[in-house]
């Protein structure tokens, strides 16, 4: 047995004992628990301080497992939904979660009071090895205290959750860096609840049908959320964040300002720290480094973080979604 096999086996054993294991995915690090074990799932909510009306994504290792953990017979149209799943299959493993009626095997608290479950196959060798060794569904939201910036390195997980997690698998920095696209297949028109690296345009092309965007939705505090990513304030550093378009000439600026830069924009005010995400405006590079940069700025003792912006098109939609939520007052 190699060292990494032993580490994976140990992590799978911890999950079997109802413990919490953080692991890397291509999007962000997940805080995992056995999705069939309600007590283990409850520990995720406690460790994150996550509101109990905020459902969890369940990770699986193969498309075949979708029918094990979702109950497609309860779909609005099982034949159409099965067709959609076969069309989406080439996107997995990848940063796409599908919302379907919850199967019997999944603990109820995964759905936070609802009857649906979000499923995805993560594209990361360690995550897939863990899923195969465990051979069960792993519920895993981002491995950070609720509402804070998602973790894209193992150190971010340790910084945020410390002793509250039983083990952290270190797979290096996450390649995508933004949470998965969440698409609901619960109704006649598929609906993106949270934008991510798999864009609406990609989904429309692969499904050959219209896909509704997230913009039409409003989060209603206190009700079961369609998708927790819909909270107006989320993914946010402790330091106040503003988008550069919200600044006016007359804005009263504090002394210590940090800037998050990813275009040719040149701030016309004094700054004490600048983090540039991509020298050529490459949005994939911006996405991969965004959360790490927000944490770096948040740790710099600033009064204000001013963020650059991009067109909310393609991957730019997910980037601006996260920055808009981070800057929400
Ligand atoms: P996190 O991984 O911490 O960002 O949180 C999990 C994400 O999963 C949320 O942002 C939701 O978008 C999504 N999600 C999980 N389960 C469901 C569900 N049953 N219905 C809708 N969205 C869900
Ligand atoms: Mg999260």
Image: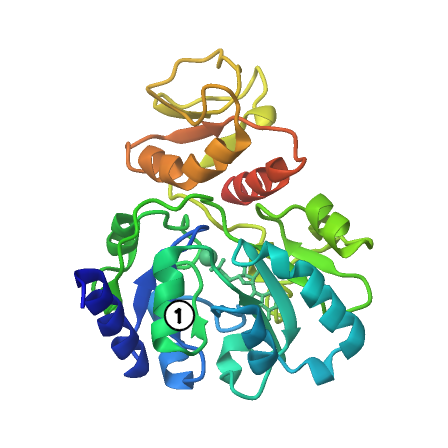
Q: Which of the 4 image quarters holds residue 186?
A: bottom right
Q: Residues within 10 Å of mark 1 (few under 14, many from 20)?
A: many
Decide if residue 138 is on the left or right side of residue 202.
left
Q: Which residue is mark 1?
A: 131
Q: Which of the 4 image quarters holds residue 41?
A: bottom left
Q: Position of residue 294 (x, y in %)?
A: 39, 37
Of 317 and 65, which appears nearest the observer? 65
Q: Residue at horizontal 65%, vertical 73%? A: 100
Q: Position of residue 199 (x, y in %)?
A: 65, 46
Q: Residue at horizontal 73%, vertical 52%? A: 206
Decide if residue 150 is on the left or right side of residue 215.
left
Q: Residue at horizontal 33%, vertical 68%? A: 47
Which residue sits furthest bottom?
104
User: Helix or strand or loop: what does disc 1 sit on?
Assistant: helix
Q: Position of residue 14 (x, y in %)?
A: 26, 77
Residue 20 visible = yes
Which residue sits furthest front?
1
Above or below, 153 against 87 in this view is above
Of 281 and 136, which appears nearest the observer? 136
Q: Residue at horizontal 36%, vertical 30%? A: 303
């Amino acid at each position: 047995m190699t060292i990494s096999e032993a580490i994976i086996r140990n992590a799978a054993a911890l999950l079997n004992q109802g413990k919490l294991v953080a692991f890397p995915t291509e999007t962000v690090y997940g805080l995992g628990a056995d999705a069939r074990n309600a007590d283990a799932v409850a520990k995720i909510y406690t460790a994150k301080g996550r509101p109990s009306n905020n459902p969890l994504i369940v990770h699986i290792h193969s498309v075949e497992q979708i029918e094990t953990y979702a109950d497609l017979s309860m779909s609005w149209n099982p034949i159409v939904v099965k067709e959609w799943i076969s069309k989406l299959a080439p996107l997995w493993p990848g940063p796409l979660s599908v919302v379907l009626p919850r199967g019997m095997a999944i603990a109820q608290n995964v759905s936070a009071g609802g009857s649906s479950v979000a499923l995805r196959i993560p594209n990361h060798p360690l995550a897939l090895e863990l899923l195969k060794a465990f051979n069960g569904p792993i519920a895993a939201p981002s491995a950070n205290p609720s509402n804070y910036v998602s973790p894209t390195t193992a150190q971010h997980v340790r910084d945020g959750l410390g002793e509250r997690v039983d083990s952290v698998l270190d797979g290096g920095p996450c390649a995508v860096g933004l949470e998965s696209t969440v698409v609901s297949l619960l109704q006649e028109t598929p609906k993106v609840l949270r934008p991510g690296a798999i864009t609406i345009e990609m989904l429309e092309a692969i499904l050959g049908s219209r896909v509704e965007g997230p913009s039409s939705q409003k989060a209603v505090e206190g009700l079961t959320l369609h998708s927790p990513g819909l909270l107006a304030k989320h993914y946010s550093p402790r330091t106040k964040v503003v988008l550069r378009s919200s600044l006016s000439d007359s804005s009263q600026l504090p002394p210590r300002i940090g800037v998050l830069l990813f275009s040719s924009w040149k701030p016309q005010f004094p700054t004490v720290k600048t983090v540039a995400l991509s020298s050529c405006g490459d949005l994939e590079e911006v996405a991969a480094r965004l959360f790490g940069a927000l944490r770096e700025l948040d740790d710099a003792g600033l009064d204000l973080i001013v963020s650059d912006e991009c067109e909310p098109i393609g991957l730019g939609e997910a980037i601006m979604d996260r920055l808009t939520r981070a800057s929400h007052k």
